[in-house]
Image (cartoon, helix red, strand yellow):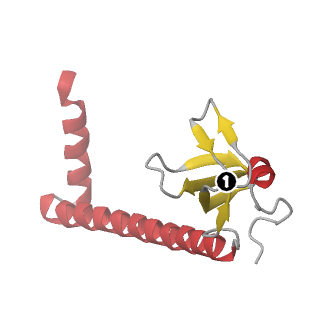
Amino acid sequence: MGNLGYYQDITKLIKALGGPKVAIPVILGSGYAVIRVGEAGVKKAYKVSSAVIRRWKATDSIVGRVFTVHSDSDDSGGGLTLREGDEIQILERHGEAVQIVVLGNADNPYWVSAGLLASICDFPDDIEEGAD
């Protein structure tokens, strides 16, 4: 049989459907239906995930705030050095991890712990994520 296996299977399927005049519209219609169902699923997933992200970002009151550093800090492993007087802006937060931008620094952004920020600036360590 060799390389004729699939060819024979397709030929049998086309004959069972009533010939090429019937099989081609059936195959095209089936393919169109599968694509449309997949498209609808992707659109729905995108809408849901976008709404969740917008709601999460809109309700976290700490995002976007700017804080002034009052104590020096040096993270030798991460390459972040903060000096007294530096200003940092909060981009996002996931639990204890906070993404910041050091204003005036070209090597942004950085991920730091909320505990570190609370110890070197006025970052509130008791605020809940997602709270207004």
* Number of disc labels: 1
What is the quadrant of residue 65 in the picture?
bottom right
**Residue 73 appears in the picture as rendered:** yes
When asked about the image quadrant of residue 125, the answer is bottom right
User: In the image as oriented, which residue stretches furthest toward the top?
Assistant: 2
Please report the residue visible at 67 percent of the width from the left and 46 percent of the height from the top.
112
Horizontal and vertical percent position of residue 86:
61, 55
Q: Residue 120: percent from the left, percent from the top? A: 75, 51
Query: Residue 75 at what x, y percent from top left?
Result: 65, 35
Q: Mark 1 points at which residue?
A: 98
**Residue type at the position of mark 1:** Val
Residue pushed farthest left?
A: 21
Q: Which quarter shows the N terminus?
A: top left
Of residues 61 and 107, the one nearer the viewer is: 107
Classify 10 Å Cα crowding around label 1: few (below 14), some (14-19), many (20 and above): many
Any part of residue 1 in sight: no
